[in-house]
Amino acid sequence: MWFAKGIFVYANQLEDELWSILDFFIIRFYFMYFSLFRLLKVLVFAVAIFLFGLLPAYTYAETEELRPHTNNPILAIVDGEPLTLEDLKNAQIHDAMVQLHQIQSQVLKEAVLTKLTKNHPELKLENEVPLPSEGDVVRFYENTPGIKEMGTLAKMRREITEYLKKFFRNTYIEDRYQLAIKKGWAKIYLQPPLEFKLKAQVSTAKLWFDEDDGLTRKVFLLEFSDFQCPFCRRVQGTLNKLREQYPKEVQFGYRHFPLDFHKEARYMAESVECAREQGKFWELQKLLYVDSDSVSRAKLHQYAKKAGVKNARRFKTCLKERKYKERVLNDLKEGMKLGIRGTPTFILGTYDKDTRVVYGELMSGAVSEENFKEVIEKYLSISRAEASLAQ
């Protein structure tokens, strides 16, 4: 009895011991599992907080990092290949980039000088910029081609004065800016847009010099103009000077680009083509630019007579039938394909006489003689270098 009871008690004790041991392992396993799981969750959460917290700072650091200016940035990565600004560039984009660069350059110069004046007072701009005198205004009016056709001195005085004020200020800023660069007080990273070469067909353009005169002109200045455009009229004097300076080196051509809002421009373009039949293209072209504000369709035959067109009936018939309507429209279409949107626009570059193609750059507006000459000399140097290598 005692034995049996002892066995029972022992069995109960053993059971309790076993359950105690089992409970220990179960509880330990539970807490171990729970702790590991919880620890894992905490770690994941902490890593997430770390990454998400760091990412904005990292992105901010990326965007705020100072880097030298590049004029050909990567705009996208497509299938692992970079797509740069140069890959997208056309004449319109290039023209806009050139204008933007001009604005950036001017603003940068003023910002550089403003920042330097604290330690270099000799660069101070205020109250030192010279103002144009009455003599400056008169000389500008007398010596600037095309300006007299725009009005009397009294009418143009205010515009000339404002222009000269801006010109004198920019010149003054440029002098101070170059001094700062020369002294090493500033290092400039802004660069102009990379060159953009267009391929322009000469096609039916009227040439200034005879192609059969025995001279080989390797540079071509191709003009797209509108007879009622004031800037086209203004630039004609500059072009005449260039023709006198480069009679053996540069060929000049004229194509039409009449704008829609100039109602008579298309008919004026057709009229010079009619005069071209009788060898008087340039004579009539010159007269129309001189009086472009007052020329009407009904008076075109009078101007043709004044330009030396002999066969008046032939000219009138040509104009009435609009014989050269398609030629003018073709000039307009080809100009638009090149990216031309306004006038005057010029394609200036090297010239292949055999293919009658100009490979060059686009220049817009009433370009100054100095700017034209700078680009002309560049292409003349290129053509001379190519000729030297070919020998």
Image (spheres, rainbow, N blue to C red):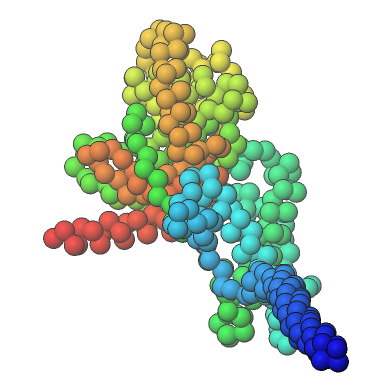
Residue 91: tell me if it is visible: yes
Question: Is 257 displayed left or right of 382 in the figure?
Answer: right
Closest to the observer, 59 or 298: 59
Residue with the most extreme front position: 1
Percent across and percent down for residue 234 are 56, 41
Residue 42: tell me if it is visible: no
Question: Is 91 displayed left or right of 308 in the figure?
Answer: right
Percent across and percent down for residue 367 are 52, 49
Above or below for 378 versus 274: below
Residue found 67% across the figure and 38% down from its top: 151
Q: Quadrant of residue 45?
A: bottom right
Numbered circles on residues, count: 0
Residue found 47% across the figure and 8% down from its top: 320
Of the 4 image quadrants, the one containing the C terminus is bottom left
Percent across and percent down for residue 64 are 67, 72
Of the 4 image quadrants, the one containing the N terminus is bottom right
Closest to the observer, 81 or 131: 81
Closest to the observer, 153 or 39: 39
Question: Is 118 displayed left or right of 364 in the figure?
Answer: right
Residue found 46% across the figure and 23% down from its top: 329
Percent across and percent down for residue 215 are 22, 45
Residue found 50% across the figure and 30% down from its top: 257
